[in-house]
Image (cartoon, coloured by chain):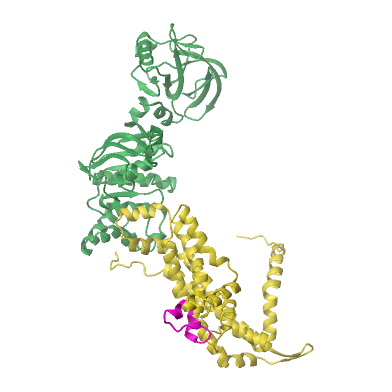
Chain colours: A green, B yellow
Amino acid sequence: MARIEFQNLAHAYRPNPATLDDYALQPMSMVWEDGGAYALLGPSGCGKTTLLNIVSGLVKPSEGKVLFDGRDVTALGARERNIAQVFQFPVIYDTMSVFDNLAFPLRNRKIPAAEVRKRVHEVAEILDMTRDLPHKASNLAADAKQKISLGRGLVRQDVAAILFDEPLTVIDPAMKWMLRRQLKKIHQQLKLTLIYVTHDQVEALTFADEVVVMTNGRVVQKGGADALFLRPDHAFVGYFIGSPGMNLCPIELDAEGARIGAQRLALDTDTLATLRHAHEHANGSLTLGIRPEFVRLAQEGEAGAVKAQVLRAQQLGNYQLVTAQCDGHLFNAKLEPHVRVVDGPAWLRLAAPETVFFCNDERIDARISEGAAR
Amino acid sequence: MNKPVNQKAWLLVVPVFICVAFSAILPLMTVVNYSVQDIISPTQHVFVGTEWFRNIMTDPDLRGALGRQIIFSACVLLFEIPLGVGLALAMPASGWRASAALVILAMPLLIPWNVVGTIWQIFGRPDIGLLGYWLNSLGFDYNYTASPTAAWLTVLVMDIWHWTPLVALLCYAGLRAIPDAFYQAAEIDGASRFAVFRYIELPKMRGVLMIAVLLRFMDSFMIYTEPFVLTGGGPGDSTTFLSQYLTQKAVGQFDLGPAAAFSLIYFLIILLLCFILYNWMSRVGKGGPAAEGDEHAG
């Protein structure tokens, strides 16, 4: 078990990267605390797997350092690093029994047979696979095979961290829950550092203490579920987390205040001042973000509301999903199922205490206070 | 449960049945027909029962040819399979080098069989052939038209040159189908290069290896053109294999009865040996003893 630290780490698959876009993984520094459960979340091709392979030593970073408990391991290969990795598709040694599969990493390291037997039985106990030990591994179901992959990591006493690369992709939905729960149990029991790559936000949020959201080779936010939901640091996080994601729309400032296209959006003076400051300081474009959960219908002319056109309302049982258009921008709203919504003109409250603002996609510290929005 | 009876289904099987009948069963039955009759003239024939079978089985020439054939096929498998696997492992995995290696490797497979025989016939000649000339000038007494050993070696090396690429290509395809994750897992598990071969590559190549073994066995067991062009079965009958023996009987001496009887036996031998090989290889791959370690949990 170890605390893993990245120091100015970056990786490019091509030599001599000139711009940030040339990097598969843009320069960053980060710490993975010992015993923490982390999820790496992001769309396909965002650099999650590259980052994971850098931790395990399968990929050597082109810049920066990787430290395990303060020890520089950047130059070490996968076999010297004591990392266990579970891959997307189950990797097992077909011709071996479950026992031999689990014993394989120990036998390769010339551990005495008695010790091997003891460790394998302990791990089989943890994984609840003792009965399968004498059987051929190739005949087992996909979830059992993934457990063997995990077990090959657990048998090694000195394992620094266990990495999962979308390990539940090939597992039935019903088994997924069981396996995930078992994983959590193992984590609590053994206090291992776990890093879990996924593109499924539910998986990430339920599994991990902290979620690391990535896009385009960049870590955009590291935090718990509530931070990702309520205070996304980057517009991408708002858009990626939640179903449907955050409503994002550009806003413009003029002498009188803020507007969305031609529609005026009434904001309190404090918020307006912060926005003005950010806009002038960074000379960036401003974006308003509000989760569909916090959008509601408003009275005509109410503070923080804009005039919109309701396009459709879908009843989804416990809520209804209303889609509306305001000056060419689409907004989703999750409303109570009993609220009566008719297609046509309506007022939507977009500036609420939960509304966040981004300048050049980075969140700025402008929040509408409870009183001001009323 | 009641299944609906639908006799129309037979109609759908008829075309396949007719095709198979014309392509396989009818010709085979002709051979069966010849093997139990003595054809004296187009209008005269006598039923002779198993006489041709007894006749041919006691032929010492056949026994000699069969023995040579078995040794030859065994040698072919023994050399070509490990060599093919080795070549496939040594080949580059991607990039222009992989394409180049594939093209070079596939070259012998594109040459017509009688041309292969001719190439080696000239290549091995002691007077003008590159191989023969150099071997002799290095002090080896090499002359495949005079020495049975030299003839044997030449035929064997020719077959290895001609067909190892097929084995290598099949194995190469099998190797490329192994996902990277297996190699990465082995790296993490600290496996040696040999362990990677033994526990990942070899098991994953089992399917293609089985095809390679069966193909090479059947082809080598029926080999005809190349030795016929290269040595004509000689010197003496030292490189006369089964096909050539059969041709001598059927076409050379026009002994249709014994030739037909032997064709059937030949067919059955190949079928039987393929069956044995296939079953053996399937068992080695899948079943086998469950745990190879000393450990069996209760």
Give the residue displayed 57% in from the left and 65% down from the top. Answer: B110
Residue B78, picture quadrant: bottom left
Tell which of B3 and A93 is nearer to you: A93
The percent coordinates of residue A251 (x first, y second) are: 45, 16
Q: Is residue B131 magenta?
A: no
Q: Is residue B229 above or below residue B2?
A: below
Q: Between A72 and A46, which is closer to the camera in this rendering? A: A72
- In the rendered image, residue B229, in percent from the top left (x then y), is placed at 59, 79
In the displayed orientation, state which residue is furthest to the right.
Answer: B43
Relative depth, front residue between A88 and A243: A88
Observer able to see residue A160: yes
Q: Is residue B271 visible?
A: no
Is residue B148 a member of the stretch shown in magenta? yes
**B8 relative to B71 in the view: left or right:** right
Name the foreground residue: B70 vs B298.
Answer: B70
* Coordinates of residue B255 in the picture (x, y in percent): 67, 89
Q: Is residue A296 above or below residue A109?
A: above
**Residue A209: image location, x then y, percent:** 30, 36
- Residue lying farthest top? A256
Q: Quarter of the image containing the N terminus of chain A?
A: top left
Q: What range of the chain is rendered magenta?
A: B134-153
Q: In the image, is A370 to the left or to the right of B121?
A: left
Name the outermost residue toward the left.
A70
Give me the residue at 38% from left, 60% from top: B200
Tell me: residue A6, above or below residue B194. Answer: above
Please state the total of marks drawn on the protein image: 0
The quarter of the image holding the C terminus of chain A is top left
